Image (cartoon, grey):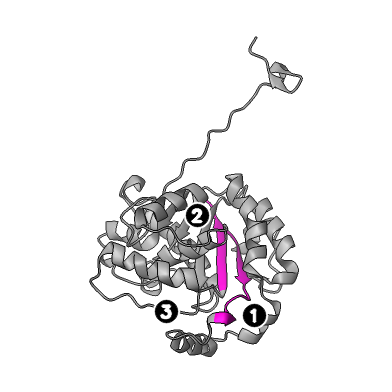
Amino acid sequence: MAKMIREVAIVEGQWKRDVWSHNLSEEIELIKQCLSEFPIVAIDTEFPGFLRWTPKGVSDEEFYECLQFNVNRLSILQLGLTLTNDNGKIGMTWEFNFQDFDKISNMEGVYSLDSFLKNKGFNFNILRSYGIAPQEFGKQFNPILRSGKIQRWITFHGLYDIAYLMKFTYIRCMPTSMSMFAISAAHILGTVTDLKHMARYSNNLLNGNLGLKRLAKLLQVNRTGTAHFAGSDSLLTAAVYAKMKIIMKVEPKKHEGFLYGLPYPIQGYRRPIVIVDPSKLTDGRISTD
């Protein structure tokens, strides 16, 4: 799939680009180039766990309080981004590896998932030594967010994914309410679509009561790479989105802009592009004659 991007040919079966501190700048530049052809971004994050677990049956605001507590205190391990477009054509996947998580490794509530990730193959020593500093990633990635080149973000059950992405934009603390979170996300990111919310509108997808693995299996979409790694999960999210667009018969306005578990829409509006006739330019200004 990645060979569809002219600038990024598959070499020896490569389907994703691993990003560390030493090659961050060149990979950010490559993403900028590819967004013109692939302006939709599927996202996944991997993080150490939860310091505060959310009980079942809590209200929306109580759920958000737990998210706010966790995201304000934790840092992610990986960020996966896969570029795609409205025609279902999938480009390259990037897997960003971060270093700034070890300060919470001994905190209560993290240990069990920490062990789980080690069993999956995460090498925490390599992450700490060669991973990207979140502040540096934010500095280099924020111009992409401000450029307006990203048409929308695709997630699966992505409230935490979007929250962690927002942390890269110099937000010191999560907004104090769900409504303010939605407003901030729309302002910073634009439109977000969540496949788990989207699945609610299909009779064949269990009303959205399923995980990404089960959803992919029902749609006969195969995974590339290893589950619980951000690159593989973001690529699977992009592939599932392409398949869902084919089978979904409901109007997009019913599911676009909503995250699963968030009652407020996250939907931005891109400024219209104004094409100026060069003959009307006078000293760099538009002539009204």
- The mark that comes first in sequence, 3 or 1, is 3
| Camera-side residue of 107 and 259 | 107
Residue 273 % position (x, y) = 57, 33
- The mark that comes first in sequence, 2 or 1, is 2
Q: Which mark is residue 88?
A: 2
Left/right placement of residue 171 relative to residue 210 reads: right
Q: Is residue 236 magenta?
A: no
Measured along the vertical axis of the image, is residue 142 above or below residue 95?
A: above
Q: Which mark is residue 127?
A: 1
| Camera-side residue of 165 and 246 | 165
- Three-letter code, disc 2: Gly
Residue at mark 3: 51
What residue sits 50% from the left and 54% below the top? 88
- The mark that comes first in sequence, 3 or 2, is 3
- Three-letter code, disc 1: Leu
Which image quarter is the N terminus in? Answer: bottom right
Secondary element under disc 2, as helix, strand or loop, is loop
Secondary element under disc 1, as helix, strand or loop, is helix
